[in-house]
Image (tube, helix red, strand yellow):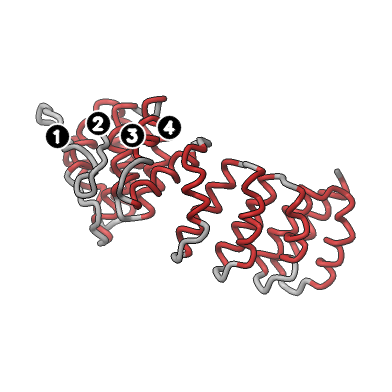
């Protein structure tokens, strides 16, 4: 259960009392093997075992660090949450929420979000909403990202604040998740991200504006056709094709004539063909 103090974020998660199952535990150990094939083989075996393996994986995951950065620890945590998602048993809900809120490895958190989306019920949403009240800013942020990923806008204001974070990764997460929410009221703030100093953020902003569907952003997207990044240019063209209709064809044709990057030319032309054939 979530609590609100700074030092402790989650109540102690005690291990489940289980009968010894040497076979399952040995397979779980292989999830941190240096060999990719060994890890995948172990993952497949556990997925085949299914529900019976879930408590053992949960117990093992509870012993894993939140902040270890070595490949062995990363592989262990990532593969455990991945298998829990593959099995899809809701007994894994709490330990996945714990990883989302507490793990310092971005890839583990995002894989936990994916897994939780498979096993979650209404109770999971309520636990994440409660986490938005936490005094720890990291916990609040991660809860908002997870909720937004599930199309729940309870953390929308926190995500909008994230657009101004110094770390570009936070800004990218904010833009990406706001795109999932598809809230037209956020389009103006996201449009500003087309001028971000991070190429990754600008690319995501160009793509997100097409998802949101607010025609007020067309002017900003037209300007983005001149971006120094080919990835931004073709994503802007793609979003313009969704928003502008046939009236935007001359603008995209002009961008295509000037385009020198091979990949960007391909994708801009693809957007143009869809417009003309639609």
Q: Earlier in the sequence, mark 1 or mark 3?
A: 1
Residue 100 in the image: x percent, y percent?
Answer: 34, 44
Label 4, residues with CA under 10 Å away: few <14, some 14-19, many ≥20: some
Q: Is residue 134 left or right of residue 238?
A: left
- For mark 4, what is the residue? 118
Q: How far is mark 1 from mark 4, CA to CA? A: 24 Å
- For mark 1, what is the residue? 14
Residue 258 or 44: which is nearer the viewer?
A: 258
Residue 124 in the image: x percent, y percent?
Answer: 37, 30
- For mark 2, what is the residue? 53
- For mark 3, what is the residue? 47
Could you tell me if the residues under marks 3 and 2 are in contact, i.e. CB atoms within 8 Å?
Answer: no
Q: How far is mark 3 from mark 2, CA to CA? A: 8 Å
Above or below, 21 relative to 189: above
Q: Earlier in the sequence, mark 1 or mark 4?
A: 1
Residue 230 or 4: which is nearer the viewer?
A: 4
| Foreground label between 1 and 3 | 1
Q: Earlier in the sequence, mark 2 or mark 4?
A: 2
Q: How far is mark 2 from mark 1, CA to CA? A: 18 Å
**Kind of element beneath mark 4:** helix
Residue 47 in the image: x percent, y percent?
Answer: 33, 34
Query: In terms of image quadrants, where is residue 104?
Result: bottom left
Above or below, 100 relative to 152: below
**From where the camera sits, is residue 272 visible?**
yes
Q: Earlier in the sequence, mark 3 or mark 4?
A: 3
């Amino acid at each position: 259960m979530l609590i609100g103090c700074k030092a402790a974020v989650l109540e102690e998660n005690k291990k489940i009392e289980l009968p010894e199952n040497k076979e399952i535990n040995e397979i779980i150990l292989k999830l941190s093997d240096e060999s990719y094939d060994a890890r995948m083989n172990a993952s497949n075996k556990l997925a085949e075992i299914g529900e019976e393996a879930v408590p053992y994986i949960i117990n093992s995951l509870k012993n894993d660090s939140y902040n270890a950065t070595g490949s062995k620890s990363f592989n262990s945590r990532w593969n455990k949450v991945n298998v829990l998602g593959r099995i899809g048993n809701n007994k894994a809900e709490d330990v996945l929420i714990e990883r989302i809120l507490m793990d310092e490895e971005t890839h583990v958190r995002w894989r936990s979000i994916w897994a939780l989306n498979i096993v979650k019920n209404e109770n999971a949403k309520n636990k994440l909403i409660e986490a938005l009240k936490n005094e720890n800013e990291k916990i609040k942020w991660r809860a908002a990202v997870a909720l937004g990923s599930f199309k729940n806008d309870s953390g929308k204001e926190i995500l909008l604040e994230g657009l101004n974070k110094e770390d570009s990764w936070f800004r990218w997460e904010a833009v990406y998740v706001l795109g999932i929410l598809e809230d037209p009221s956020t389009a103006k703030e996201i449009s500003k991200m087309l001028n971000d100093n991070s190429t990754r953020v600008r690319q995501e902003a160009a793509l997100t504006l097409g998802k949101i569907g607010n025609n007020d952003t067309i002017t900003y997207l037209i300007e983005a056709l001149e971006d120094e990044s080919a990835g931004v240019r073709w994503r802007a063209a793609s979003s313009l094709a969704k928003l502008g209709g046939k009236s935007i064809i001359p603008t995209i044709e002009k961008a295509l004539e000037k385009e020198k990057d091979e990949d960007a030319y391909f994708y801009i032309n693809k957007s143009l063909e869809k417009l003309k054939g639609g």
